[in-house]
Image (tube, rainbow, N blue to C red):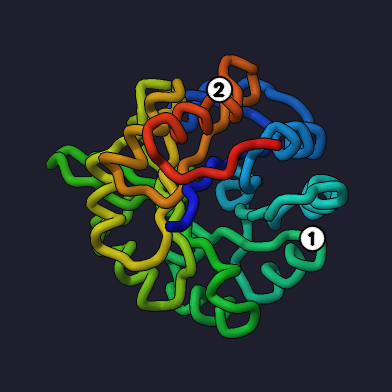
Amino acid sequence: MLTKRVIACLDCQNGRVVKGVQFLDLRDAGDPAELAITHAAAGADEIVLLDITATHEARKTLLDTVRRTAQNLFVPLTVGGGIQTVDDAARVFDCGADKISINSAAVTRPDLIAEIGSRFGSQAVMVAIDAKCNEQGIDEVVTAGGRNATGRRVVDWAREAETRGAGEILLTSMRNDGTQAGFDCALTSAVAESVQVPVIASGGAGNERHFVEVFEKGRADAALAASILHFGTHTIANIKLAMRNAGIPVRLPC
């Protein structure tokens, strides 16, 4: 049985890690390179670095930040934000990333998924989906950091992304993001049941039990955390210990 992964997320703005609630009210959490090494040493299975304002500001990913973060890292690094072409992806890989994450650009031009996958392999292409419940109570795909509604249903887009060559789905529930009230297990489960590729749950991690729930009820393959790790309220070791005690296969920190 494959082990479940605990992933540390670094949301970056202007070269610094920030964290807010539902993508708003951002506060500084530290230097990405330092936090990446700290989380990896503490037992994170992977690091995800997202340049969260690159698309909205119509600019490329901050490559120097990626390079510094990857330099001394010994776990896989995924980078997203501002990647709109195969050449953009190549530059990020050249800076040391193991995978790239595409969000808004994939929705705008779905062929980008296959283009990057054919050059670097589908295992290196993560499609990030930001989900927001609309006025009709439907989970809808939003882009540009939650600013733009697309009219696409989350499950439908997840299926299409897989068909086009996505190797993983990173699913963020905007209504849960930063609340520390728990993951959206119902939405995560719906997406996990609709695709064959791994699904990473994001948004709402607040304690160890939330991770157990998203693996048991949400059927996630991995779960992502940010503020509870950056600000020291919980540790990866305790999260993984709770998972093991619940019978969830996990790689414990050394």
Residue 201 vertical placement versus 176 (above, below):
below
**Residue nearest the viewer, comparing 234 with 180:** 234
Residue under the point 36% across and 21% down? 181
Placement of the C terminus among the 4 image quadrants: top right
Count of numbered badges drawn on the protein: 2
Q: Amino acid at mark 2?
A: Ile
Placement of the N terminus among the 4 image quadrants: bottom left
Left or right placement of residue 159 versus residue 65 in this view: left
Other residues around mark 1 within 10 Å, as few (<14) / some (14–19) / many (≥20): many
x and y, in percent, of residue 146 in the image: 42, 42
- Report helix, strand or loop for mark 2: helix
**Residue nearest the viewer, comparing 70 with 210:** 210
**Residue nearest the viewer, comparing 150 with 68:** 68
Q: Is residue 235 visible?
A: yes
How many angstroms separate mark 1 from mark 2 (CA)? 26 Å
- Residue where numbered disc 2 is placed: 228
Residue 10: quarter of image: top right
Residue under the point 30% across and 36% down? 184
- Residue where numbered disc 1 is placed: 96
Q: Amino acid at mark 1?
A: Gly
- Report helix, strand or loop for mark 1: loop
x and y, in percent, of residue 174 in the image: 38, 36
